[in-house]
Amino acid sequence: MLTDEEIRNAARDALIQASTTFRPDQLKAYQMALERETSPQGRWVLEQILKNAAVAREKRYPLCDDTGIPHVVLEIGEQVCMSGKAFQAVAEGIREGLRDLPGRPMAVRGEGLERLGQTLGMYDDPGMLEAAPFGLYWTFGDVLKITVLMLGGGPEIRGKTMRVFHRHRGENVIEEVGRWAAEAAAALGCTPCVPIIGIGRTQYEAAALQLAAALEGDFTRQSPWEAKITEMVNNTGVGPLGLGKSVTALGSFVKIGPARASGVRIVSLRLGCCFDPRRATVVLKDGGD
Amino acid sequence: MKVKTPVLTEVVRRLKVGDRVEISGPIYTGRDAALPKLCRAIEEGELPKLGLQLEGAVIFHTAVSPAGIGPTTSNKVEIEGSIPVLSRAGVRVHLGKGALRAETVKVLQETGAVFMVTPPVTALFINNIRSRRVAAFPEDGMEALHELVVEDLPAIVAIARGESIF
């Protein structure tokens, strides 16, 4: 049986790693981007981002001062036993991770309209920042996978969730969301970006699939429709930090979910920034006793 | 190119779009909350009370939190809207990210100021900061106007002499 302490520590460690460390596929994407980028200013930006990743990893500093809102996904093996307090243990691990990092103290004080209007300011304690509702999936075997994704604010401003008429051609859906991403890329600022997309039957499902796309996405494995969206964004010529020219998107992550018998698909786009997806997974094995 | 603060007029005059610079010396920070307050203080003749040295100043559009610093988007209404007043008050370098409007490009040219951008490389910036203190508007917390002493803070000139890289 997995103990609450193991689960708490795993959530904390995943948060710190997601916030400070580029994954191998991300590093590879940047190295390939440096080879492709033709603008000297754009190359300079890519080099700065790679240097930043090296320092962040070595010193355990945050990659970005917008440390993001924690999103947790639990993949629970069918043979895993854990107590009903496991979810509280994850929440405690998130709180510890935010204090250790330290995260940006951006939990807003007050209730109702005061919270909406941010009229009472923020809590000083980074640990007051609540994680978003957890995502839950089952998996095979005796492992519990705890993944933490840290979602910064800029990409939320540039994203949207909306219906798209497919007109009985799948490419129409991909091209429409590709246009959304291309239009928003210049305004994002923190390019190169990564369009992260979920496609489902309801607004809720599309947003959950968008997070699943961030969970599974790999820059070194791109489907033809992901490559198409990346190409559309790169054709804008916005380039790193908007300074031009070749690399506006590092890649795209698309998760296509179930479809409804209908003329529309619900599409949810997060136009991820140059650090997206900040993601790390810690795997716990249930020894059985 | 190394740029020391306060930035001299002849140094700004030499800068052109695409130049890479490293900024050293005291700089100010401010974003949505603090910059409109600073503009109001200037317009109401209250600047001397704040004890800030705006002649030749660099203003970095960032919050200063325990997580570090990093540029916010400069074309937000309250931030871009502060550029004309601050430039006329002596600010020579506005540092942030994102494209600015044609009218702002013109104001920068008229006032002899420039706009620089820098990537959100928070881990690198931690090594550039020598000291930090709240200089004005402490009620804004991490968005208060801070004075940072920096060494070799990297940036690139995005708007200068009426030209924009965007």
Image (cartoon, coloured by chain):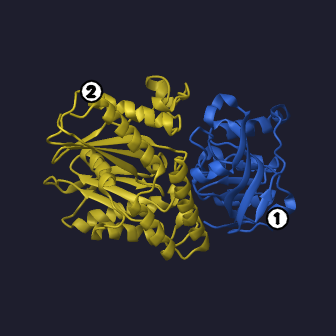
Residue A235, located in which quarter of the rendered image? bottom left
Q: Position of residue B49 (x, y in %)?
A: 83, 31
- Of residues B5 and B91, the one drawn nearer to the viewer in this rendering: B5
Q: Which mark is residue B13?
A: 1
Q: In the rendered structure, the residue with mark 2 lies on which chain?
A: A
- Which residue occupies the extreme top position in the image? A111
Tell me the kind of residue under disc 1: Arg
- Of residues A156 and A50, the one drawn nearer to the viewer in this rendering: A50
Q: CA distance from mark 1 to mark 2?
A: 64 Å
Residue at mark 2: A85
Write down the colour of chain B.
Answer: blue
Circle 1 packing at 10 Å, graded few (<14), some (14-19), many (20+), is some
Q: Which quadrant of the rendered structure holds the N terminus of chain A? A: top left
- Of residues B155 and A261, the one drawn nearer to the viewer in this rendering: B155
Q: Residue at x 21, y 40 (%)?
A: A286
Q: Residue at x 27, y 62 (%)?
A: A173
Tell me the kind of residue under disc 2: Lys
* In the image: residue A2, left or right of residue B84: left
Asked whether the residues under marks 1 and 2 belong to the same chain, the reply is: no
Q: Residue at x 53, y 27 (%)?
A: A123
Q: Secondary structure at mark 1?
A: helix
- Of residues A66 and A173, the one drawn nearer to the viewer in this rendering: A66
* In the image: residue B81, left or right of residue B53: left
On the question of residue A236 being in view, the answer is no
Kindly indicate which chain is depicted in yellow in the rendered structure. A
Q: Position of residue B72 (x, y in %)?
A: 58, 48
Foreground: disc 1 or disc 2: 2
Instruction: Note whether A85 is above or below A142 in the view shown.
Output: above
Q: Secondary structure at mark 2?
A: loop
Circle 2 packing at 10 Å, graded few (<14), some (14-19), many (20+), is few
